[in-house]
Amino acid sequence: MAAPRKKKKINTADRKRELLNLFADISGKTEIVEPMKKIHGTLRDKDAIEREVALVMREILDQGHFKTKLKPRDLACLVCGYYEGKNDTEIARQLGDEKLSKTVARARVRLKLFRDLDFKMPFERELMEQLLDSGKTMKDISEELGVSPSTLREYRHVIEQEKDTTLDPFLERIRDVMEDRDLTESMTRGLNNDGLSEAIDATEAELADLS
């Protein structure tokens, strides 16, 4: 009776490297970020993205950097909506109340998610800033500039938030999350168009078994 063959021991690190190289070959990607589950799984999940942004928003609110009736998850939805190209009314509608559009706009500006329209003032910006520094009342300044006091306050809010650096460390973290999302969605679209999703899933399963 023949002696049983010894099972060949698999080098886990080498196997992972082989699988990643295989993925690079079939997808045409020259750089693969390991682990692959980060590329193909969590980061392309919109809910996961919103949860991560919401955690940052909770920090901002808990530290009292600005007050709003919007909750952390609402603010995360606002950020994602902004990056998706939605306007303030569309974002408010997504939050369940179109009347929140002004609240959304003010929170968006506080988060430095500016739109070109925010800076389209019917007067010279420098003139407004000079008048605001002059000590005149908002009523006097609004009359001189030919706008309502409420409109003037909105323009002042934009200028103040543009200059305020308080939230910059938090906003940088949010931008990193959104850039990861953009990269992931771009890669996922390309892979789906090439019909490679199943190949990636199979490769991920093998990597998970080797972990």
Image (spheres, rainbow, N blue to C red):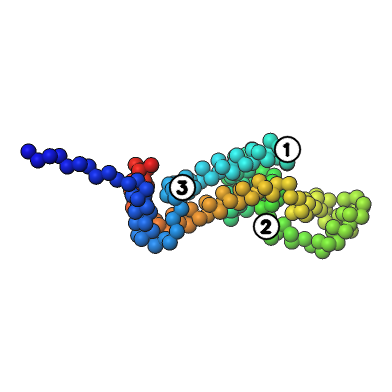
The N terminus - image quarter: top left
Badge 3 amino acid: Lys
Determine crowd level at label 2: few under 14, some 14-19, many 20+ residues with C-alpha closer than 10 A: few
Image coords of residue 81 (percent x, y): 58, 50
CB atoms of marks 2 and 1 within 8 Å:
no
Q: Read off the residue under disc 2.
A: 115
Q: Residue at x 35, y 60 (%)?
A: 26
- Of 74 and 178, nearer the camera is 178
- Of 110 and 91, nearer the camera is 110
- Of 93 and 166, nearer the camera is 166
Nearest to N terminus: mark 1 or mark 3: 3
Horizontal side of residue 144 vs 4, given as left or right: right
Q: Read off the residue under disc 1.
A: 64
Can you name the residue that lies furthest to the left here?
A: 1
Front label number (1 vs 3): 3
Image coords of residue 198 (percent x, y): 34, 51
Q: Residue at x 74, y 50 (%)?
A: 165
Horizontal side of residue 2 vs 191, given as left or right: left
Q: Is residue 56 above or below residue 90?
A: above
Badge 1 amino acid: Gly
Q: Which mark is residue 38?
A: 3
Q: Residue at x 68, y 35 (%)?
A: 62
Q: Residue at x 59, y 44 (%)?
A: 53
Image coords of residue 123 (percent x, y): 81, 63
Disc 3 element: helix
Badge 2 amino acid: Arg
